[in-house]
Image: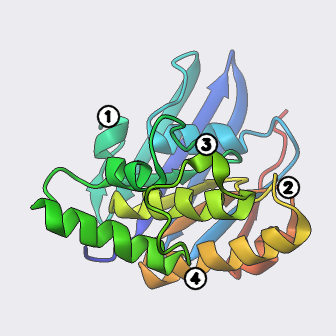
Amino acid sequence: MQAATLQLHAVRIALHGRVLIGALDAGVEPGECLTLMGPSGCGKSTLLNFLAGTLDPVFDAQGSIAIGGTDVTTLPPEQRGFGILFQDDLLFPHLSVGGNLAFALPAAVRPRALRQARIEAALGDAGLIGFADRDPATLSGGQRARVALMRTLLAAPRALLLDEPFNKLDAQLRDEFRDFVFRHARDFGLPTLMVTHDAADAQAAGGRILQLEQEQ
């Protein structure tokens, strides 16, 4: 898939008349990570929800979102092209590791042998060869996090949203998974927008930092 730029233009989000995000313009190049920081309640995760198309209608949102020059502002979430990683890995407990990865593959990826090859390649990339039949509950936190990222990437997103995905990992795993995520974002040429409270996350991302302030 061709690398694309993520562009936000005149994004404004308010709740009951209180402005959370005001007149935000930002561009994120392929492989770049833009980090959003700021106090709780300033609208960081709300902005990600707006981008993903999952913002509660109680919010008043304006502005436009484009990926690769295509306006996706009014498209349903599944058509926008965003991959998302949250604090929780959100693996499906009723599916095996391989089943979780297969769930993400676009229907156009066929025949079955090609789908299986994609899954095996993802497991190899994550250092989890032979784990396809494992129950996700038997994996460590770091292993689950890697599976969650590979599942996101197998869906062939055009941009990546990170909503504090490193928060629940211990210090060593956090460093390892940060490197894993940002390396893959660069390798896949994904414009990435990350929300975090941790300055170390922003430093590891190596990109620009946008400090959001609490609007009055």
The N terminus appears in which quarter of the rendering?
bottom left
Lower sequence index among marks 4 and 2: 4
Q: On the rendered image, what quadrant is the C terminus found in?
A: top right
Q: Which residue is mark 4?
A: 183
Residue 110 in sight here: no
Which class describes the residues within 10 Å of circle 2: few (<14), some (14-19), or many (20+)? Answer: some
State the residue in front, 26 or 195: 195
Q: Amino acid at mark 4?
A: Arg
Task: Find disc 2 in the rendering and name its residue.
Answer: 197
State which mark lies toward you, 4 or 2. 4
Could you tell me how far apart the alpha carbons at marks 3 and 4 are, in whole angstroms? 24 Å
The picture quadrant where one finds residue 199 is bottom right
Name the residue tied to disc 1.
Answer: 76
At a point 50% along the width and 61% down the height, the residue shown is 160
Let me know if residue 50 appears in the view.
yes
Q: Is residue 17 left or right of residue 41?
A: left
Q: Would residue 216 appear left or right of 7 to someone viewing this image?
A: right
